[in-house]
Amino acid sequence: MNFANFRIFLIYLFVFLGPLGNLLCPRFLPYQFRAFYFVLPAFFLFYTKLYYKELKTVLLFLPFFLYALASAYFCINRPALHFEESLISRVGLFACEVLFMFGAAFCLRDQKMAKEKKRLIRIYLAAFFISLLVGYALFAGYYLKVFSWETIDKFTVITQMGWGILRFSPGSYPNEYGVVASFVSSILLLLIIERKNPAFQLGLSKKSLYCFFGLTFGALLLSTTRAAYLSFVFALLYIFCISKSFRYLSFLGLAAVMIFFMVMGDRLELVMEILTSSFKPSYYKDVSMQLRLEHWQESLDAFNTFPLFGRGFGTLFYVHNVYIELFAELGLIGCLTLLFFGLAYFFQHQIGIKKVFLKRWASTEELFSNRVIVLGFIHIFSFALTNHNINHHLTWMVFLLFNMGLFARKPDTSLQQES
């Protein structure tokens, strides 16, 4: 294996290890540690050769990284905060994720993008399917009295009950696994709807697609993650907007639901009461939203205390809202620095960004991967409203797919010019 192939192997390994969470991690490591962290320190191998546009992007990111590092350092030296977590390591993890993501995109610059993106998506789906099998084995084993709670706890980040059932989360947090299951469900639904389109072929048979979708959607439901349910609804709305076939099926489904309501009549209220009776007690006892509101208020108070420079990068990771978290951690100066990077990045790559989001700018071969990227962004940015996902593998996997197209050097000969 030569050096170039070894670097590509590292990228494939990063994609494969992500959905497995901590399933492959030695038990002596912290429970939050994920297997894909092992690959991140090798990011420097991708930077042996840089073109001007690539170097410019890295240099644009540098001021924000230095600001985050400085804010974490000064937070450690503020005795009044009494913050015991290793903030520098959090900044280091974030930097490794960003630099690995950009470096991997640079490394794949000369590959055929449509083919390479599909390969990464296939690897990701294969790894997720393995986690599904492990998850269902643990779930069934728990209720069949084969596995104890302590055994289950060795294969998850946090083992929890939700709405009276064991939350489905092999190798991960229930919330994190739920949003990944939602993302994969939306991809599989797209493949099912567009299975006759050659650009949407991944080598899966019709039966395999339906089986995979059923298992994945079941995992989504069993994760009992409301934020993931909401993300899936947003994904369905996006698919509804782009697919005539799905709009047709949606109208048929709506008609079936209306007929069901008409047939049930007065009996519907009794059925709904039976279905929701088991959920009401646990729902009303659930204080997770109340805790989130308290943490959000705490973050705003922190911003009022340190409005210019913020409380320090990584100090409010428990807030469960990435936007409020960054606002309070970075302060006005840090947010402006991040905004500068975002705007400069956009203007540097605006043509490539249009290819992802606008069909008339995209090649036929990349249409599927572009749809997957948009679905990924829907899940990332909606999930960030009520959770912390800066260090989630899904976040950086989607940004990797996104940036691969922006830094590609091989021209796409099948570019559509239709208006």
Image: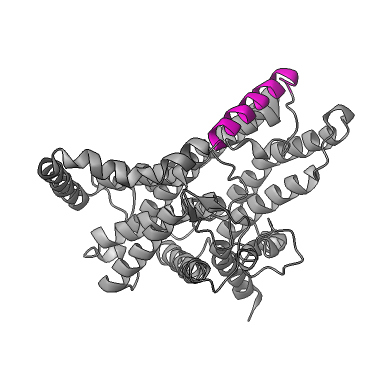
For the point 59% across and 38% down, the residue is 320
Q: Quadrant of the N terminus?
A: bottom right
Left/right placement of residue 63 relative to residue 131 reads: right
Q: Is residue 22 visible?
A: yes
The percent coordinates of residue 353 (x first, y second) are: 44, 44
The secondary structure that dominates the magenta segment is: helix
Q: Residue furthest bottom?
A: 1
How are the colours assigned in the image? Answer: one colour
The percent coordinates of residue 54 (x first, y second) are: 60, 50
State the image quarter where residue 30 is shown.
bottom right
For the point 69% across and 64% down, the residue is 38
**Is 334 rendered above or below residue 362?**
above
* Magenta span contains residue 290: yes
The percent coordinates of residue 122 (x first, y second) are: 43, 68
Left/right placement of residue 52 relative to residue 416 reads: right
Instruction: Give the magenta part as a residue range.
Output: 287-308
Q: Is residue 419 visible?
A: no
For the point 20% across and 41% down, the residue is 268
* Magenta span contains residue 266: no
State the image quarter where residue 369 is shown.
bottom left
The percent coordinates of residue 384 (x first, y second) are: 53, 39
The front one of 124 and 63 is: 124
The front one of 142 and 394 is: 142
**Is 117 rendered above or below residue 231?**
below
The front one of 261 and 355 is: 261
